[in-house]
Image (spheres, rainbow, N blue to C red):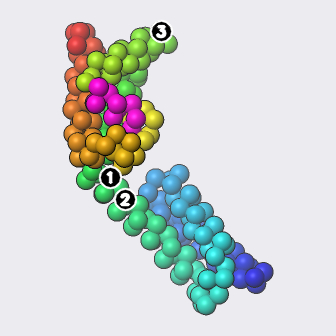
Amino acid sequence: MQQQTERIEGAWRREKPRILAWLKGRVREDMAEDILQDVLIGALANLDALEPVRDLGAWLWRGVRNRVIDGWRSHRRREEAGEVDLEDFDAIVDEALLSAQDELERRRILDELEAAIDALPSGQAEVIRAQALYGESFASISERSGVSIEALAARKRRAIASLGARLGARKDGRKG
């Protein structure tokens, strides 16, 4: 077992710089290190299963590539289910906050955001709060509420459009 750990650590030291460089070209920099760490932890946790592996460097590369591919597939599935709209919601909030002159103005904008969410139909408001504010997945919301993922995605799209219009009108000096 100790010999196997040393083999993994040696492969880790040899391959880490090249794997990280490869990963940074494909995922965010903060994710690259996390992916590599996860693969190493998985290897160390399954030392018995790795005994027949001759080229641990190649094994690390394959594990990292598999993680990246799994991430892309997961992202595509979430996107197809309409779950990737968080960036739109974040952009709306960030834009409003960045244009704020001072903390009092920021607080007022956040209050307007809360009021805008409260003014949404209850199903839309629930999806925005659950997913965009609390990070809950569509699958979890669907299971809890009994509403299909497709319906939840549609509600979220309508909610984001309404919030963008309402907060955009505020930004332009009009009331929305």
**Kind of residue at badge 3:** Leu
Mark 2 Cα within 10 Å, few/some/many (few <14, many 20+)? few
- Where residue 54 sits, quadrant-wise, is bottom right
Q: Which residue is mark 2?
A: 74
> First in sequence: mark 2 or mark 3?
2
Q: Does residue 28 sit above or below 120 in this rendering?
A: below
Rendered location of residue 138, percent (x, y) = 35, 45
Q: Which residue is mark 3?
A: 104
Question: Of residues 123 and 116, which is closer to you in this image?
Answer: 123
Residue 45 colored magenta?
A: no
The residue tagged with tag 1: helix, strand or loop? helix
Question: Of residues 142 and 41, which is closer to you in this image?
Answer: 142
Q: Which residue is mark 1?
A: 78
**Kind of residue at badge 2:** Ser
Q: Does residue 149 sit above or below 54 in this rendering?
A: above
Range shown magenta: 122-131
For the residues labelled 2 and 1, the Cα–Cα distance comes to: 6 Å
Residue occupying the far right of the picture: 2
